[in-house]
Amino acid sequence: MADDGATRTVPGLDVVKAAAWAMGIAMVVNGGLYLIGDALGAFPADAVAPGQGGPVTLGPVLALSAAGSAVGVGVFTILRLFTDKAWTVFLGIAVAVFLIMAVPPFQIQDVPVAQIVLLETMHLVTAVATIGAVARIR
C-alpha cells in the first residue's frame, strides 16, 4: 500500500491533546499565581473558601484548574456530536460559566482584595486556556 503523505490521526486524539494542553497551561499558570500570591500573604489561613471548609490552598487550585479545563473540552466534544454550531454554543456556555465563577471569590469571609484579584485571574486563565485549546480542534 502506497503512502499518500497524509497525516493519519487516531479519532479522538485531538480531544485528548486539547484537554492536556488546556489542563497543563491552566495548572502551571494558576499554580504560579497561587505560589506568588501565597508568598505575598494573599491566601491567609483564616479566609475560609465556600465549599472547601478551609483556606484556598495549592492542591484545590491545581485540581480545579485541571477539572475546569477537562470539563470544558469535554463539553465541546459532546456538542460537536450533536450540532454544526458547536463552537458558537461552546463559546456561549464558556462565557456564562466564566461569569458564574466570578461570584465565589466574593463569598469568602475575611478575604484580602489581593486574593479576590488572584482567584478571578485564575478563572480567566482557565477559561482562556480552555477556549484556546478548543479553538485548535474546532
Image (cartoon, rainbow, N blue to C red):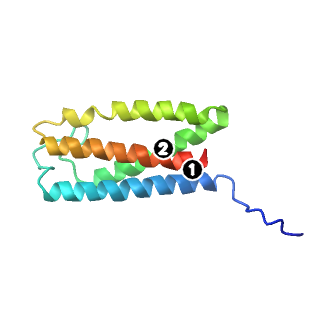
Which quadrant does the C terminus fall into? top right
Residue 121 versus residue 74: which sits nearer the camera? 121
Give the x, y percent position of residue 27. Answer: 36, 56
- Above or below residue 32? Residue 47 is above
For image coordinates 54% across by 46% down, the residue present is: 134
Residue with the mark numbered 2:
131
- Tag 1: residue type? Arg
Query: Is residue 131 in view?
Result: yes
SS for tag 2? Answer: helix
- The residue positioned farthest toward the bottom in the image shown: 2
Residue 82: mark? none
Cβ atoms under marks 2 and 1 closer than 8 Å:
no
Q: Earlier in the sequence, mark 2 or mark 1?
A: 2
Query: Is residue 53 in view?
Result: no
Residue 136: mark? 1
Left-right relation of 73 to 103: right
Q: Residues within 10 Å of mark 2 (few under 14, many from 20)?
A: many
